[in-house]
């Protein structure tokens, strides 16, 4: 402890402490023989894209997915699937649902600094999906497997006890051999691994209007709208568009005030048609930091529960599915789960992480202002714009046969 304190490596110390002392101590009682615990199901908490994908990839084990909601259910989300033409190359379950999935293609995107247009790019950029349909199709694809079942169950605590994990809703308990925490930003499974609740600058606060209007096909992204840290968006949808925003840290007014101001601005500029009417308004946090502990001998985290969201864009659906797939495959193989999961997920952790800490707001805004200045003026502006678009849209490692066209 003293060495870590003196060398400034406290985060490494706590990670080591939780893994080697805390979790081992809390697990020392009630050890079950290996054969007994293998018979218990693997419980996946959360049936979003991470949970359903983990279940889809879990072979040779009984799997129980639990979710506090019944499906189909809505999830507050822009619904943008970046590079979705490549997703079939990554995910078998995506290919399986594609024939029944309604997507709305988005052609062209305009980038703004606050309300000033900076640059635009054309061509197919992403597809929009309605999460109520997308998540339900993914869950149904997982439930087609004979080893997977679903139960509506609101988890209030998760306890690691010897070789088993007890998942409870306060009334009933489910004993599992292993648990995968896919329960979103406020994950009970993350808590049971000793991770603290997220702090204010470790998640984006997001709010979104689902707008009924004539379908549009162009996306608009307003970085640092009203000089707040984050961005506001207009994403086209087959049913109209989604108008939303997400800010990190301390913003000045209530989020709803910014959102209504943003919608008025977009209508005033003709970005959103005047005939627009608000169908629904949703709010939800979007985590942007990876917790200290996300893999343990019988508990793994995936998706938002693991904070696996790309900091620059807020993109989380792809990484939820990727981490779910890796968690499922890791648990299906006879390997040291904790080490193997960390090894395989490491590339995605690096891909989503731009900064380990968000600097104070004035510094962060100045850095972003400088970047947008370079994209507006000067001899290298097109190269900087292209680099920015690639870091926004591109995967670090493209699959064989990728259709991604670099900017
Ligand atoms: C406003 C907004 C817009 C976004 N837009 C985009 C976008 O355009 N593109 C993109 O890629 N990403 C976007 N994201 C991020 C994306 O929505 C998430 O990263 C993604 O949904 C993560 O999937 P998941 O499966 O990890 O978690 P979720 O989809 O959140 O699923 C978690 C599941 O766990 C269940 N659950 C939670 N707690 C419990 C409990 N205690 N017991 C039982 N069940 C529980 C929930 O009911 C839920 O079904 C956006 C996020 C927000 C907030």
Image (tube, rainbow, N blue to C red):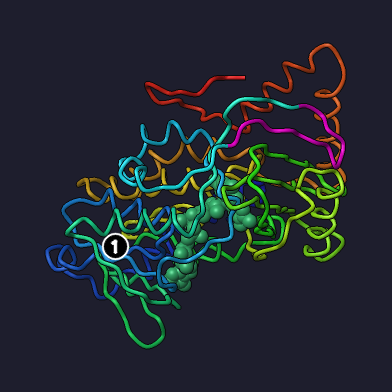
Q: Quadrant of residue 124?
A: top right
Q: Is residue 111 magenta?
A: yes
Seen in the image, is 280 located left or right of residue 73?
right
At numbered mark 1, what does the secondary structure look like: helix, strand or loop?
Answer: strand
Magenta stretch: dominant secondary structure: strand
Residue 17: tell me if it is visible: no
- Residue under numbered circle 1: 178
Q: Which residues are magenta?
A: 106-119
Structural crowding at the residue carrying mark 1, measured as other residues with C-alpha within 10 Å and reported as few (<14), some (14–19) or many (≥20): many
Name the one closer to the observer, 40 or 222: 222
Judge by depth and name the residue closer to the eye, 346 or 262: 262
Task: Pick the quarter of the image with the N terminus.
Answer: bottom right
| Label 1 CB less than 8 angstroms from ligand 1 | no
Horizontal and vertical percent for residue 120?
74, 27
- Please indicate, yes or no, whether residue 348 appears anywhere in the rendered image: yes
Q: Quadrant of the C terminus?
A: top right
Horizontal and vertical percent position of residue 194? 49, 65
């Amino acid at each position: 402890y003293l060495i870590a304190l003196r060398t400034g490596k406290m985060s490494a110390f706590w990670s080591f402490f939780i893994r080697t002392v805390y979790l081992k101590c809390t697990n020392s009682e009630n050890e079950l023989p290996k054969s007994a615990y293998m018979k218990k199901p693997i419980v996946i908490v959360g049936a979003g894209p991470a949970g359903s994908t983990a279940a889809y990839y879990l072979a040779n084990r009984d799997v129980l997915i639990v979710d506090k909601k019944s499906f189909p259910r809505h999830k507050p989300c822009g619904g943008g699937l970046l590079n979705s033409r490549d997703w079939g190359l990554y995910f078998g379950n995506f290919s399986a649902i594609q024939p029944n999935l309604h997507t709305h293609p988005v052609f062209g995107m305009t980038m703004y600094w606050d309300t000033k247009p900076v640059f635009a790019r054309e061509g197919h950029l992403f597809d929009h999906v309605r999460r109520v349909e997308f998540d339900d199709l993914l869950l149904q694809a997982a439930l087609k497997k004979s080893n997977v079942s679903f139960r509506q169950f609101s988890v209030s605590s998760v306890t690691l006890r010897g070789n088993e994990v007890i998942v409870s809703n306060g009334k009933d308990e489910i004993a599992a051999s292993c648990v995968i925490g896919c329960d979103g930003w406020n994950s009970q499974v993350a808590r049971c691994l000793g991770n603290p609740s997220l702090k204010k600058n470790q998640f984006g606060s997001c709010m979104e209007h689902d707008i009924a209007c004539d379908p549009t096909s162009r996306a608009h992204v307003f970085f640092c709208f009203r000089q707040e840290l984050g961005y506001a968006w207009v994403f086209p949808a087959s049913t109209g568009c989604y108008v939303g925003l997400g800010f990190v840290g301390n913003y000045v007014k209530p989020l709803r005030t910014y959102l209504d101001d943003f919608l008025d601005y977009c209508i005033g500029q003709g970005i959103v048609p005047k005939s627009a009417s608000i169908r629904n308004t949703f709010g939800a946090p979007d985590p942007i930091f990876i917790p200290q502990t996300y893999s343990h001998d019988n508990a793994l985290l995936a998706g938002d529960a693991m904070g696996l969201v790309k900091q620059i864009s807020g993109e989380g659906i792809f990484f939820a599915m990727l981490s779910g797939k890796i968690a499922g495959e890791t648990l299906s193989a006879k390997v040291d789960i904790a080490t193997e999961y960390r090894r395989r997920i490491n590339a995605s952790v690096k891909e989503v992480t731009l900064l380990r800490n968000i600097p104070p707001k004035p510094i962060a805004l100045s850095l972003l202002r400088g970047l947008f200045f370079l994209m507006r003026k000067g001899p290298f502006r097109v190269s900087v714009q292209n680099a920015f678009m690639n870091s926004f849209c591109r995967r670090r490692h493209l699959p064989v046969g990728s259709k991604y066209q670099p900017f």
